[in-house]
């Protein structure tokens, strides 16, 4: 089995998942070694005397697609969604947008890193764009000391770079030519932690000795990446980590491995690696001062599960991750000995032309999740809508609609 692609996934997480999968098959011990090439690892073991081998090559998300397309990879690890051109290119073999091919294996927060001595604690996405494009060049312009800013960024083959480019730079900004570029998240973070003037970005698992900033988007409150904000994808720079396979034509071992990764055992390894697991847990949110009293009263006897349901098309079609998350919620209820009566669904809408329209959309979203839960024999779950209030991102556009248009899952405290 060969896994090619993202350094974010391949540096530590993918080898840990492969080792866990081998152990689940009764393969022990498992040996991990370099094959002599940078950012590549080979894991080996024996099962009933038969050698088992897996290669993890972590050279960037785009390299993984090329390997999958060329037939050199069984699994493409990617820290960004498949691009439309990639979906079209491989359409004759598989639909990368289909649940049989697209697998969300973990949630990551794109951490904005500075030196531990930096007095700046939070920035907006727009300010980040100005910093990394060179429009803001001195820390004193954003509340820091009078020192020139040094930029650290991932390289062009990286899905982390693609995510940063999409969420922060967009079409408005271009990366300043002074930025130092890296293939490795860990090396970037280590260099930032040694540079009092530095700022960079990396996956959440690579924070290491750097300081993490809180980030705001539009009028939404600034959030630091943590268990709840990242798992729910409320954090503005949260992102999904993917593994792609060639649908039904994928080798059986690759399909079995993906099923292991998506299950509770694989997700426990995700958490152990420093990324955010998709296994739901209940958390009492730390509300900021902007949360309305009506919402506080609505949720006062509840805790929030670390999962949001989001939608792929229109207002009510659940995306691939959401369908899997509902199975995880069903497992959570069984494990915690809870019932449908203990759940509450709260739907939200992106900014609409009037409150009534926003309320209707938010309720329809919650209702669609309620109906999907009924297919899992979880019946008559309480639901409500909260309109377009309490946004987690800037309003409008594809990103705003997807992030603000969500259903939160709340569970009653016993």
Image: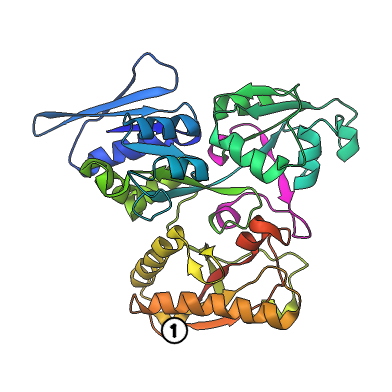
Furthest residue in direction top, as rendered = 36
Residue at the spot x=68%, y=68% of the render? 350
Residue 291 visible somewhere in the drawing: yes
Magenta region? 204-230
Secondary structure of the residue carrying numbered label 1: helix
Q: Is residue 213 magenta?
A: yes
291 vs 361, nearest the viewer: 361
Task: Pinpoint residue 410: horizontal percent, then vertical percent.
Answer: 53, 73
Which quadrant of the view contains residue 395? Answer: bottom right
Taking the image as shown, residue 60 lies to the left or right of residue 70, namely right
Q: Tell me the quadrant of the picture where the N terminus can be found.
A: top left
Number of marks present in the image shown: 1
Q: Is residue 370 above or below residue 305?
A: below
Q: Which residue is mark 1?
A: 341
Which quadrant of the view contains residue 185? Answer: top right
Task: Pinpoint residue 99: horizontal percent, then vertical percent.
Answer: 38, 56
Q: Callout 1: few (<14), some (14-19), or many (20+) C-alpha neighbours within 10 Å?
A: few
Q: Is residue 373 above or below residue 198?
A: below
């Amino acid at each position: 089995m060969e896994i090619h692609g993202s350094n974010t996934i391949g540096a530590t997480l993918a080898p840990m998942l492969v080792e866990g999968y081998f152990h689940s098959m009764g393969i022990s011990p498992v040996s991990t070694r370099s094959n002599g090439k940078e950012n590549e690892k080979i894991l080996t073991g024996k099962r009933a005397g038969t050698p088992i081998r897996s290669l993890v090559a972590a050279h960037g998300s785009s390299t993984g697609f090329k390997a999958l397309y060329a037939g050199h990879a069984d699994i493409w690890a990617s820290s960004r969604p498949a691009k439309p051109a990639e979906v079209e290119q491989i359409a004759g073999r598989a639909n990368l947008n289909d649940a049989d091919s697209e697998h969300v294996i973990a949630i990551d927060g794109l951490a904005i890193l500075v030196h531990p001595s930096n007095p700046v604690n939070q920035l907006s996405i727009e300010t980040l764009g100005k910093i990394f494009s060179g429009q803001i060049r001195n820390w004193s312009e954003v509340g820091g000391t009078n020192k020139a800013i040094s930029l650290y960024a991932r390289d062009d083959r990286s899905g982390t770079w693609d995510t940063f480019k999409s969420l922060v730079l967009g079409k408005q900004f271009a990366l300043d030519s002074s930025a130092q570029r890296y293939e490795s998240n860990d090396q970037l973070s280590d260099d930032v932690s040694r540079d009092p003037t530095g700022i960079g970005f990396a996956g959440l698992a690579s924070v290491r000795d750097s300081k993490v900033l809180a980030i705001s988007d539009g009028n939404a409150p600034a959030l630091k990446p943590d268990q709840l904000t990242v798992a729910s994808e409320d954090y503005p720079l949260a992102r999904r980590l993917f593994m792609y396979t060639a649908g039904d034509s994928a080798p059986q071992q690759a399909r079995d491995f993906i099923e292991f990764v998506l299950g509770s055992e694989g997700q426990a390894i995700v958490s152990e690696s420093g990324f955010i697991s998709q296994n739901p847990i209940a958390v009492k949110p730390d509300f900021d001062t902007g949360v309305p009293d009506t919402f506080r009263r609505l949720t006062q006897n509840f805790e929030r599960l670390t999962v949001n349901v989001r939608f792929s098309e229109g207002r009510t079609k659940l995306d691939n991750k959401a369908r899997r998350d509902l199975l995880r919620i069903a497992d959570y209820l069984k494990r915690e000995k809870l019932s449908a009566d203990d759940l509450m669904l709260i739907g939200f809408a992106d900014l609409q032309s009037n409150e009534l329209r926003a309320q209707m959309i938010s309720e329809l979203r919650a209702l669609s999740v309620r109906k999907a839960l009924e297919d899992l024999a979880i019946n008559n779950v309480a639901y409500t809508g909260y309109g377009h209030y309490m946004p987690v991102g800037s309003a409008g556009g594809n990103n705003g609609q997807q992030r603000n248009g969500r259903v939160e899952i709340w569970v009653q405290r016993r």
